[in-house]
């Protein structure tokens, strides 16, 4: 049996983005923010935030009879890990085919390509 992925689901990532934006948030804060974009049950948000705590993406403390959640990792750390896992899973660990796909698919703008070239020069 394959070990459980630590990559975030779409909803988990959406919740994390809200927590990162607010720095700390209650379930109600996240629920109300999500409601602006979609219909969702309060209990679903609560369950997802508990799962994120179990996965160690969030930690909670009690404040005025409510749990307040904070991210345990920065957005940069999480995204880096998700990209690394994606490249490993889809491209057998090589980022070259991913970049080739993005270029061939015309997913990258001229500005994106210039930025990539600049980053590559910095790495040399």
Image (cartoon, rainbow, N blue to C red):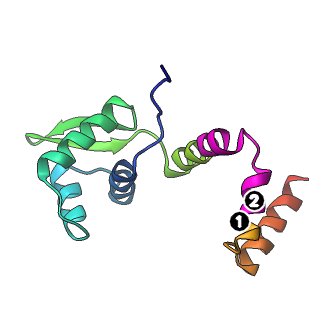
Which quadrant would residue 20 be assigned to in this image? Answer: bottom left
Which secondary structure class fits the magenta region best? helix
Q: Is residue 14 depicted above or below 5 in this figure?
A: below
Q: Residues within 10 Å of mark 2 (few under 14, many from 20)?
A: few
Q: Which residue is mark 2?
A: 99
- Residue at the front extreme, as displayed: 1
Instruction: Report the front residue among 46 and 38.
Output: 38
C-alpha span from label 1 to label 2:
5 Å
- Whether 94 is among the magenta residues is yes
Give the magenta range: 84-101
Mark 1 in CB contact with mark 2 (< 8 angstroms): yes
Which residue appears at 20% of the width and 40% of the height? 47
Q: Secondary structure at mark 1?
A: helix
Which residue appears at 70% of the width and 44% of the height? 91
- Residue at the right extreme, as displayed: 124
Residue 36 image point, x, y percent: 22, 71
């Amino acid at each position: 049996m394959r070990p459980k992925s630590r990559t975030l689901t779409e909803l988990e990532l959406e919740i994390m983005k809200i927590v990162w934006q607010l720095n700390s948030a209650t379930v109600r804060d996240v629920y109300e923010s999500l409601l602006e974009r979609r219909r969702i049950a309060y209990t679903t948000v609560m369950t997802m935030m508990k799962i994120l705590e179990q996965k160690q993406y969030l930690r909670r403390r009690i404040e005025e009879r409510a749990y307040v959640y904070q991210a345990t990792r920065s957005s940069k750390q999480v995204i880096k890990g998700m990209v690394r896992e994606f490249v490993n899973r889809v491209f057998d660990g090589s980022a070259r085919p991913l970049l080739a796909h993005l270029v061939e698919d015309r997913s990258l703008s001229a500005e994106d390509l210039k930025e990539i070239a600049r980053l590559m020069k910095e790495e040399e």
